[in-house]
Image: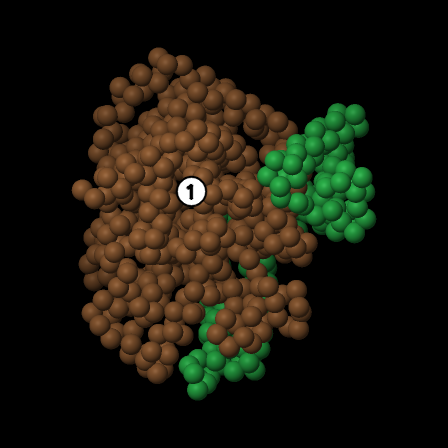
Amino acid sequence: MNPSDTSHSAGESVVSTITIEIVVAVALTIFGVVVAYTSYQLGAGWTSDGPGAGYFPFYVGLLICIAGIGVMVQTILNKDNKDDAFVDREQLRRVLSVLIPALVYVGAVQIFGLYVASAVYIALFMVILGKYTWLKSSVISLAVIVLFFLMFEVWFKVPLYKGSINLLGFLGY
Amino acid sequence: MEEISALFHGFSVIMTPMNMLLMFVGIILGVLIGVLPGLGGANGVAILLPLTFTMSPTSAIIMLSCIYWGALFGGAITSILFNIPGEPWSVATTFDGYPMAQNGRAGEALTAAFTSSFVGAFVAVVMITFLAPLVAKFALKFGPPEYFAVYLLTFCSFVGMGKGSPFKILASMALGFALAAVGMDTVTGQLRLTFGSTELMRGFDFLIAVIGLFGIGEILISMEEGLAFSGKSAKIDVKVVFQTWKKLPKYWATSIRSSLIGIWMGITPGGATPASFMSYGIAKKMSRDGSKFGTGQMEGVVAPETAAHAAGTSALLPMLALGIPGSPTAAVLLGGLLIWGLQPGPLLFVEQKDFVWGLIASMYLGNIVGLIVVLTTVPLFASILRIPFSIIAPVIIVICAIGAYTVHNAMLDVWFMLGFGVIGYIFKKLDYPLAPLVLALVLGDKAEDSFRQAMLVSQGELSIMWANPLVGSITTLAFVLLLWPIISKVLALVMPKREAQFPTERPVD
């Protein structure tokens, strides 16, 4: 999949592919340095009984650095797709409209447990992004969650996270 | 014919009503996973893995491998009817499959796709039946240096055989290694790369990475494209099936060639996706109707589907015989083996005969069941795709969260899953391959262990990697593959326009 293939007719570019490419390469290189440095501190040499704990990760860190720098050089040398958009405004909006609710959802799971948070999440997603009526959304999300509940807690006996405020405690599971 | 009797023993193990039921459930779940965006073979199996913890290992592997077959079949449905590849390995199927559907030959295209999937898988299973025990017997002689050499070969062949920038493959792989190193060091007991966090002591589980990278990442990609499904409807009746079956023998050469490509790419960790592309490309070059490819040629459906399924199946061979998975999904199945208390590797064939031959027998049966199920239920699965994305997307994210949580019953893993999702999205857009990351994450610790053991044996002399002809040739081969991008360029200069025509015939085994 070449990023330049995706249609980006709608909206202007937010950030170019080349920028993201370099940002990722730099991030990789920094990560590589961190890995190599901490491993070096652990002991990247030979101990009396063979390679130390940091020996392998140290070279892995170096490899990441090499790869990061390699990607960077390749990106800079290859000037063909300089103006390609990584995402345009419309695409970014769509992606964030999934990503941000997902973050909020995982936060809610932490507090209210998987079942309650998931039911609310599916319903809200349908109402806000899918423009469904409240009734339809609630019915569908409840049906899905009840199915999951039966499948995990009852049939396969795999308990799921109940959260720090367990609203479903009365069910006894 | 020891293998044949062992195989029949395998059939007797799996022919219980419960196992047959699990097989059907697995296939149907698998097709469902294959059809839905964001759920694929690897993360689908990863998410459903916890459900099998209470089953016997044989039943569990039957269900999970059937999910995998189902997913392989399912990918073709969306490619042909909706021009949306449900799985990466069915991208090449869209080239000719969708035009066929547009010409009103959807039924034919689907039948051709399913049947060639079946053929590819069947050839690969036959190969596994006879080759896997041999490889396992051979591998019993392996010591740590040999194992490390095989790991090295696996990783080097990613760099050598992969498409795209070798640096990106290297980056993805090394990132996997680094994540694998996080946590307690198994040899010295020291904490590595935890940065003082007790939660990180557990390390990163590759199942979390698989669910995030492939699941959440895929959802973000689909969302960006603003999916509006507008598909062709399809009905398959008996007449169309038989008509198509009558035409298929004509493409026997393509089928055989594609199966071989698939098997080769599956055993080496090339994977199903490049296998399908390579097979399509070669079929286009070799076919008399090559110029018409892309306009709805049945041969253009047969080639990628056969190769993808053959590759997907033969990826299980190194997993079973050596304990080294050939694809992310095989890696997840390998993770399953460990959880059920089985030690993957050559000893499996000696100590767990029921399990191994049960699995191989279930590959035969599962593919037959799969073929029947998909041929009869296509309209049902096609209608699932008409469920709006705004219902499917949150449900899939919930499923991913459940899957990530159940691996270790840890909420932090769910956060990591989201993080991996973002990485997956960015990596996919920038053409970083994800499979090397996952396999490095799975195999990192093991590769390191075997390296350290080898070094202990040799007192730190790297020359042990060339100590005997076996380990020496594997190691040398690994370096040849690692440097293949450079070697092939040099070769191209020396012998213009000769190589790369038939990459399957590279003298590497």
Residue A125 visible in rendering: no
Residue drawn where x is 70% and y is 29% of the image = A143
B440 relative to B268 in the view: left or right = right
Say left or right for B65 vs A17.
left
The chain letter corresponding to green is: A
**Chain for numbered disc 1:** B
**Which residue is found at the position 43% from the left and 25% from the top?**
B373
Packing grade of label 1 (10 A; few <14, some 14-19, many >=20) is many
Q: Secondary structure at mark 1?
A: helix
**Mark 1 — residue?**
B58
Q: Quadrant of the C terminus of chain B?
A: bottom left
The image quadrant that residue A50 belongs to is bottom left
- Pick whichever, A99 or A89, lies toward us: A99
Counting from the top left corner in percent of width and height, residue B156 is at 36, 62
Please identify the quarter of the rendering in which residue A82 is found: bottom right
Q: Position of residue B228 (x, y in %)?
A: 60, 30
In the rendered image, the vertical position of residue B100 relative to residue A156, given as above or below:
above
Colouring method of the image: by chain
- Give B340 or B78, whichever is nearer the viewer: B340
Q: How many marks?
A: 1
- In the displayed image of the protein, which residue is found farthest to the bottom? A48
Q: Quadrant of the N terminus of chain B?
A: top left
Q: Let me know if residue B408 appears in the view.
A: yes
In this view, the residue farthest toward the top is B239
In the image, B312 versus B61, the foreground residue is B61
Q: Which chain is brown?
A: B
- x and y percent of residue A164 in the render? 79, 51
Residue at x-position 26% and y-position 34%: B255
Q: Nearer the viewer, residue B328 or A25?
A: B328
Q: Tell me: residue B399, above or below residue B245.
A: below
Question: Tag 1: residue type?
Answer: Thr
